Amino acid sequence: MIINGKEIRINRDNAVVSETDEAYCTLVKKILEEGVQTHNRTGIDTIAIAGWNYKFDLSKGFPIAETKDVKAKNFTSEIQWIHQVQSNEVKWLNDRDNHTWDLWVVDEDGIYRIYEQGSNAINDPEREVPLKQQVINPITGSLEKKPVLDKSGKPVMVKSKDIVDNKENPRTIKEAIWFGKQYAGTIGEAYGFINHTYKRPQYVEHKLKTDPTDRRMNISLWQDAHIKNAVLPSCVWSSEYKATPDGKLHSYVHQRSADVPLGLPFNISQYAILLSMFAKANGFEAGTMSWSIMDAHIYVNQLEGIKKQLRRYEYMKDYSSAIMSSSDEEVERLYNKINELYIKINEKVKSLLGDSFDKLTMTKRINLTKTLNNELGRDYEEAYERKVSLEHMLTRETPELILASHDSIFEYSTEYVKKNDPYLKENPIGNKDIVLKKYHPTPFISMPIAQ
């Protein structure tokens, strides 16, 4: 049969929803059905549950979500930044086209600024807020924020960095925390800083080579002495490793807080890479990766995006069943019917949007169409989602991680191709030593970030 001009052969062995998407979307449904709306430090409420556990078997395939495009280049460079490079300098990521941590970087004046966001955000770019410093209460051990006073005893006031830099469309500052100029350009004493200080990844690798039965092979990114100087204390804060007599290396990863729509797909795949690197460099096969979360949540402004992802999952399950139970001719008729409906609606949208149509991304086309004709926009979105979901199931392959042979995790290359390099089509990670093959996800879904 023909899909988008290419002839394909139906491979029913691969026309299944991945175990990763099954586990992930089951968690999403649990949060939506059982979660409780909760206030938190960001000012944007979450729908949250307490406690989630799952065990991924890496021998059955690399765990990565396919119900949306997870940016492999970003999650891989981030895990190397934390555990291999052991840095807290955000420029290292920026140099590799990774801007995941830009909202959490300390400005050059030593101040970390938090900005208004969400539907209840105040719009007042000229606003000033009192500068505060994080301290640990010696009695309760809790992290508190105390005002910073000038020489006359008055609170020091801080403006938006956008106002200071005379930028257009400045953001409204919500909070300002003093870290000191020595932390400028970093996320403070967090993540890679902790690893650089305590050398726990080095410990794990040393024990894997010299004493693989050791039961203390753990990496902790939560160190009380550094919390007050951390812009964001580590969310995925611990990982433990165990080698078994059958030559496999297993891990247990714990996450205190999980932004399920945005962060969790990143975290699962990147810690699978870390486990695989430890295993490959030290003569083991990657085994299981157990995962636990205490607070699993969805921000309320992410509900639209995560429900779209969940619809894809349901479509993919339905299409998997149809492919498995139907002849090739019946599957082809199903695809032609769905594709023809999409083409028909697409032509209506094209006539509605006119010359701007070809300049817009699919997301913008759908949103603009909804604004002009809500019913047509919804039909357009559904037709598109059904089309890409069925195409995914008909062309799906099982993702595969391939690592270069090195004697240490610290020998893996940290150089990445630029974002427009054609190598990314072959390997979305973009690293010559860490290669992801056969990853063909459904399209990217944008999710808001809560600072």
Image (tube, rainbow, N blue to C red):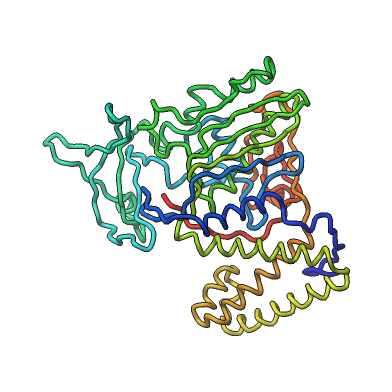
**How many marks are shown on the rendered structure?**
0
Q: Position of residue 222 (x, y in %)?
A: 46, 31
Please state if 400 lies on the left or on the right of 34 as rendered. Answer: right
Examine the rendered structure and indicate whether residue 330 appears above or below residue 95.
below
Tell me if residue 132 comes above or below residue 141 in the rendering: below
Instruction: Using the image as rendered, state which of residue 300 and residue 441 is in the foreground.
Output: 300
Residue placed most toward the observer, 91 or 23: 23
Q: Quadrant of the N terminus?
A: bottom right
* Residue 321 percent location from the top left of the image: 77, 64
Image quadrant where residue 282 sits? top right
Q: Residue at x 42, y 42 (%)?
A: 105
Residue under the point 22% across and 37% down: 148
- Residue 109 image position (x, y, % from top left): 32, 39
Residue pushed farthest front?
Answer: 34
Residue farthest to the left, as pictured: 152
> Which residue does the image show at 39% across and 32% down from the upper left?
227
> What's the residue at 79%, 58% (across, down)?
15
Towards the viewer: 167 or 55: 55
In-image side of 3 versus 134 (left or right): right
Q: In the drawing, does residue 234 fall left or right of residue 405? A: left
Task: State the image coordinates of residue 166 (x, y, percent, origin top left).
Answer: 32, 54
Using the image, determine if residue 43 lies above or below residue 376: above
In this rendering, position of residue 185 left or right of residue 309 = left
